Amino acid sequence: MSSSPSIKTAIIGGTGLSQLEGFVLKEELQVDTPYGKPSASLLSGILDGQTLCFLARHGRPHFIPPHRINYRANLWALKSLGVQQILAVNAVGGIASHMGAAHINLPDQIIDYTYRRNSSFCDDDSTPPLHVDFSYPFDERLRQALAKQAKNLSLDFSLGGVYACTEGPRLETAAEIKRLAQEGCDVVGMTVMPEAVLARELDIAYASICVVANKAAGCSEGIITMAEIEKALVLGMTRVQQLLIAVLPDL
């Protein structure tokens, strides 16, 4: 583990959030792990008076697709800095009818549809089995703190929902989304797993802030375009940054 000063809080930025506006960089940390290199260097600094670490999940610039992210290196590197809690920002597609573009959802459950990712630190004979309780994958204290500030800011948000994590990198078919809806999923994305369970194995509190980039396939007329996604993400990530600044003092 690193000898760098302990940093309690980390923000993992996803698609649309590769940097934090107003973030004052103090140190750029190159962290080596037993699992290889993280997606990018870890940025230690100050956001609106609060010390934190920022990691760009897809690299800087954005170039790593969801199925090729080294999630284990990312989480291990954050733990090595002493991180105790993570606010993860995830761009998603909206399945539930109220999940429109730029809506913010704070999910409480996950269904994992991925199939070729390293989802545990217990993967060889040298590591004893670790059967973590994953009944409730997101930290409730963090979720409630986020919901409180989202309400104070009058953001378009919802508390609670099921995140369907698919393998990617392609978007889903309309039939797949129909099945996900039938199975109770509210949003669909590609990055919350195995990130959330790896955080649990390392005893790091973890919450997801989902930003709806578009209605999922078959949930609206026409095809999904990158122009629509980018427009929604600009608005949604502006709201997320307001939320992060508001919630950090409560953590």
Image (spheres, helix red, strand yellow):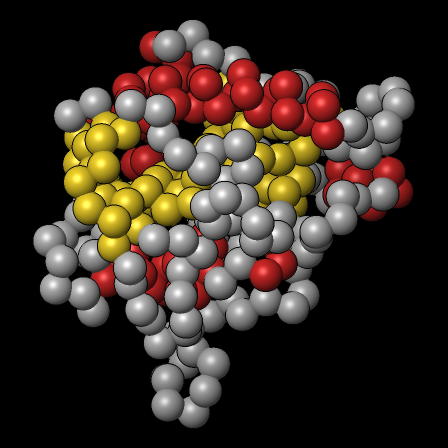
Left or right for 141, reference 7: right
| 120 sits left or right of 176 in the view | left
**Relative depth, front residue between 77 and 129:** 77
Q: Is residue 29 above or below residue 141?
A: below
Residue situated furthest top in the rendering? 154
Q: Quadrant of residue 244?
A: top left
Query: Is 166 positioned to the left or the right of 250 in the image?
Result: right
Q: Nearer the viewer, residue 169 or 94?
A: 169
215 vs 70, nearest the viewer:
70
Residue 8 vs 70, above or below: the answer is: above
Where residue 149 appears, as percent x and y from the top left, is 33, 18
Which one is in front, 186 or 115?
115
Quadrant (top left/top right/bottom left/bottom right) for the N terminus? bottom left
Residue under the image location 64 percent in, 25 percent down: 230
Quadrant for residue 76, please give it: bottom left
Residue at the far bottom in the pictured view: 125
Which of the 4 image quarters holds residue 44?
Answer: top left
On the image, the x and y values in percent for residue 111 come to 62, 51
Residue at the image position 28 percent from the left and 45 percent from the top: 43
Q: For the point 55% across and 38% down, which residue is it?
A: 15
Q: Is residue 162 visible?
A: no
> Residue extending furthest front?
61
Q: Residue at x 63, y 42 (%)?
A: 189
Q: Is residue 171 visible?
A: yes
Q: Position of residue 94 (x, y in %)?
A: 68, 29
Percent across and percent down for residue 188 are: 66, 40
The quadrant in which the C terminus is found is: top left
